[in-house]
Image (tube, grey):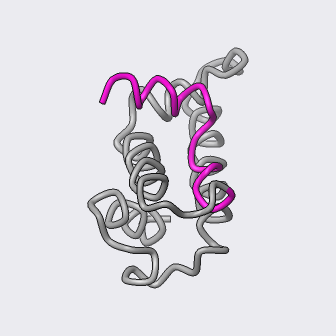
Amino acid sequence: MPDAIAKLARIAEGATPDAVGLALSDIGKIAADVRWYYEEAAVELASVAPSARAAEAWIYEKTETGKVLLTAQAALRKSGLDPLIWFFLAPPDRTRAFAAAS
């Protein structure tokens, strides 16, 4: 997981997927793995089952990894890549909120 997040962080800083060793077809898979990892962590950290979308809110509002996912998504979107490559880094409502705040 640390390697995947580090690669996404480099993309967020402006590196191309190719430069960090990621095939375009792997970006969505890696993003899903990172999100699932954090969602499982959120459940384990909570003393009770989190309410709907609480884990998502934690990831994107409280963790550095959430910021990396949003920033990498924005960088990939701005680069003109097909939306199917970057869309799954963050849910659409998180993307809109991030874009509005940036």
In the displayed orientation, state which residue is furthest to the front: 80
Q: In the image, 95: left or right of 51?
A: left
The location of residue 72, given as percent across then percent down, is 42, 54
99 in magenta = yes
22 in magenta = no
Q: Is residue 41 above or below residue 75?
A: above
Which of these two is toward me, 51 or 89? Answer: 89
Image mark count: 0
Which of these two is toward me, 84 or 64? Answer: 84
The location of residue 91, given as percent across then percent down, is 63, 35
Q: In the image, 4: left or right of 33?
A: left
User: Which stretch did the figure color magenta?
Assistant: 84-102
Q: In the image, 53: left or right of 102?
A: right
Q: Is residue 100 above or below residue 18?
A: above
The location of residue 10, given as percent across then percent down, is 32, 66
- Residue drawn at x 42%, y 62% is 8
- Residue drawn at x 38%, y 47% is 71
- Residue drawn at x 65%, y 49% is 88
The secondary structure that most of the magenta stretch takes on is helix
The location of residue 90, given as percent across then percent down, is 57, 41
Q: In the image, 65: left or right of 49?
A: left
- Residue drawn at x 43%, y 72% is 3
Quadrant assignment for the C terminus: top left
